[in-house]
Amino acid sequence: MLPLPPLAEQARIVAEVDRRLSVLDQVEALVGRSLSRCASLRQSILKRAFEGRLVPPSAEVTPE
């Protein structure tokens, strides 16, 4: 049989684990939103690049 900590210590451990899991849930949600935003920005950049709108036209650039 394994010795167990007192009930008060067990409750403290459970509370700390719950707190850390809550933080992890928040981080996971933030990462998900960030990845979604990155995908959206990537699509926007590619769309503008293929439309020739990635940078403003320059008068000095001449086609050869």
Image (cartoon, grey):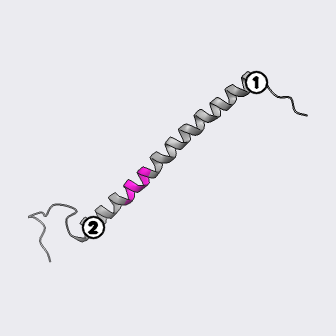
Q: In the picture shown, does residue 20 fall above or below 44? A: above
On residue 7, which mark appears? 1
How far across and how far down the image is residue 54, in percent? 22, 62
Label 2 SS: helix
- Is residue 13 shown left or right of residue 37? right
Q: Which residue ends up furthest to the right in the rendered image?
A: 1
- The answer to which of 33 and 61 lies nearer the viewer is 33
The image quarter containing residue 49 is bottom left
- Is residue 33 shown left or right of residue 13? left
The image quarter containing residue 52 is bottom left
How far across and how far down the image is residue 62, in percent? 11, 71
The image quarter containing residue 35 is bottom left
Callout 1–callout 2 Cβ contact below 8 Å = no
Residue 64 belongs to magenta span? no
- Is residue 64 shown left or right of residue 28? left
How far across and how far down the image is residue 61, in percent? 13, 67
The three-letter code of the residue at mark 2 reads: Lys
Q: Which residue ends up furthest to the bottom in the rendered image?
A: 64
Query: Which residue carries the number 2 mark?
Result: 47
| Residue drawn at point x = 35 percent, y = 59 percent | 40
| Residue drawn at point x = 61 percent, y = 35 percent | 18
- The answer to which of 49 and 18 lies nearer the viewer is 18
Q: If you read the primary sequence from the N terminus, does the residue marked by circle 1 or circle 2 appear first?
A: 1
The three-letter code of the residue at mark 1 reads: Leu
On residue 53, which mark appears? none
Part of the protein shown in magenta: 33-39
Within-10-Å neighbours for mark 1: few <14, some 14–19, many 20+: few
Q: Quadrant of the N terminus?
A: top right
